[in-house]
Image (cartoon, rainbow, N blue to C red):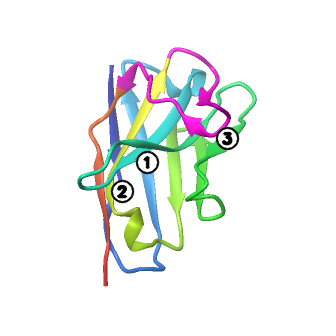
Amino acid sequence: VQLQASGGGLVQPGGSLRLSCAASGITLDYYAVGWFRQAPGAEREGVSCINSRDGNTYYADSVKGRFTIARDNAKHTVLLQINSLKPEDTGVYYCATVHQSHCTVVGGRQLSLDMDYWGKGTLVTVSS
């Protein structure tokens, strides 16, 4: 199983990007898929996640209203639209999936990092 995140780049504050997560060896349609990011010198954190059956989504408080996760089942990918980017959004963005249909949120607030498969990340740099 391999996952690959793409779509990162250099963008000015206030700009937008659309990240895409594709997989081989597994069909993402059937599993929960999460997006995570790791800023320089910081721990990896969960950003967003989408369930497979009911389509419910999770967003970290820091990205609510700016990020949107969605599935493109025709292409078997998961997209992350990121708008109104801020310098603190800078980091490597990873997608990951787990052998279950729902995202695991710890304490009702944090997305669990306990995923089965991780992809190589894509770098997002927000700078003027």
Residue picked out by circle 1: 20
Q: How many marks?
A: 3
Residue lying farthest to the right in this orientation: 54
Q: Nearer the viewer, residue 52 or 34?
A: 34
For the record, the magenta segment spans: 99-117
**Vertically, is 119 above or below 31?**
below
The quarter of the picture where residue 109 lies is top right
The kind of residue on which mark 2 rests is Gly
Q: Which mark is residue 1?
A: none
Query: Could you tell me residue 10's position as x and y percent?
Result: 29, 71
Residue 33 is one of the magenta-drawn residues: no
User: What secondary structure is marked by label 2?
Assistant: loop
Dot 2 or dot 1, earlier in sequence: 2
Residue 61 lies, in percent from the top left, at 61, 54
Q: Residue at the location (32% across, 34% down)? A: 119
Q: Check whether the beta carbons of the residues at disc 2 and disc 1 lie within 8 A of each other.
A: yes
Q: Is residue 76 visible?
A: no
Residue 57 is marked as 3
The residue at which mark 2 appears reads as: 7
Which corner quadrant holds the C terminus?
A: bottom left
Residue 2 position by quadrant: top left
